[in-house]
Image (cartoon, rainbow, N blue to C red):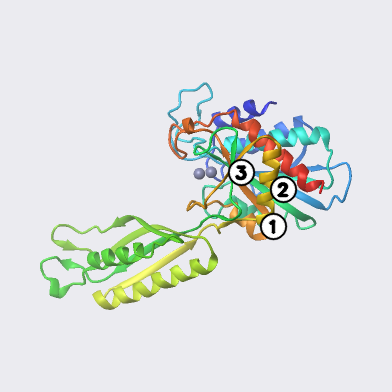
Amino acid sequence: MESVEFRRELHKHPELSFQEYRTQQFILDALAAEGIAAERIASTGVLAKIEGRRGNLKRAVVLRADIDALPIVEQNDVAYRSQNEGVMHACGHDMHAAVLFGVLCELNKERNFEGTLFGIFQPGEELNPGGASLVLKEEPFKDYAVAAVIGEHVDAHLEVGEVGICPGVFMASNDELRLYVKGRGGHAARRAEINDTVTAMADMVVRSTKLNTPDSVVSVGRVIAEGATNVIPDRVYAEGTMRTFDEVEREHIQALLRSNAREVEQCYGVEVVVDISHGYPSVKNDVMLAYEAMIVAADEGIAVREMQRLTTAEDFGYYTERYPSLFFRLGVGAKAGGSHTATFLPDEAALAVGERMMRRMALHILNK
Ligand SMILES: [Zn+2]
Ligand SMILES: [Zn+2]
């Protein structure tokens, strides 16, 4: 099967995070038809394995693609439009999976490399705890020396034919932030008898967003105070996101949020609970791998853009914590539109570029 056909089939039948049952079976069948060994992993994922013709088979390179879709009603008018109403491949994970499939097919025919090549079709990138953490929990590479884990993401800010590479820290960690203010509400006109939970939360939100720096993000996107013109509620709730580029900064921001909460409690006589649910760690590219990828790309005639770090997050960060890793961006052209929107449509011409990049990097590292 050609990569374009593979991609369109996935696009037509998108599935939400950790529900990729049909997707999993389709991938298993497509790999089997190519004679590529594969098994289920992380419940709805697939782990493919190809052994090289020579060398130490315990030395491995892992290529990774994610496979989940988003709860969006697709508005693209294409023949392979989503047939699963309300679910859409709006982040390009269908592209990632098709690139990986194409690379595995090609390398399986040649097997002209040393060591073992793994391909992970990973579920649940879009949702905590992240499919990457579930894959690694199964320790699929415990008997191997993993020389590199390589992943990619489509990017409409880059043109087709371009890849974006950032040596070192590339993407942020993300934590979910939930704030609860509890106090004695009551008649809004009898201020002496109440705790002003609404103003306490407003103060907490302002203090939180003041923690924004070039190295960290704190944003509150939802505040619920269900009082009335003349009612101050007992409870006010807010939620948002917190992003940093390293663990020290992550701890530091969390400590500041908690000390702000103590101050707000003192000022307003309320209770403030700060609940931080840990999301993905930051994506740290191995510096050597990043520079090697730049050389490989140039050699393949693929244009390289050196990228600045991004405040978005990726569960690929879990691989980068464990193994030398590289996460690069694959240009799909500005016409693709915004990811996570109902009209996102990457240029399929990028599939061949992604395949060349991944294939060459895998061979370069395995045959070193
Ligand atoms: Zn996404
Ligand atoms: Zn994505």
Position of 197 with respect to 315 (left or right) is: left
236 vs 12: above or below = below
Q: Quadrant of residue 169?
A: bottom right
Q: Could you tell me if residue 48 is visible in this image?
A: no
Per the image, the residue denoted by label 2 is 62
Residue 285 shown left or right of residue 244 in the figure: right
Kind of residue indicated by mark 2: Val
Percent position of residue 339, x then y: 47, 39
Q: Earlier in the sequence, mark 3 or mark 2?
A: 2
Q: Residue at x 67, y 53 (%)?
A: 325
Disc 3 vs disc 2: which is toward the camera? 3
Mark drawn on residue 282 = none
- For label 3, the SS is strand
Find residue 113 and report its image quarter: top right
Q: Is residue 228 visible?
A: yes
Q: Inspect the image, locate mark 3, and give the three-letter code of the amino acid beneath it.
A: Glu
Identify residue for label 1: 323
User: At which x and y percent is residue 128?
Assistant: 52, 54
**Most foreground residue, 184 or 12:** 12
Q: Is residue 52 left or right of residue 220?
A: right
Q: Are marks 1 and 2 in contact (CB under 8 Å)?
A: yes
Looking at the image, which residue is at 77% across and 44% down? 364
Q: Residue furthest left?
A: 189
Q: Residues within 10 Å of mark 2 (few under 14, many from 20)?
A: many
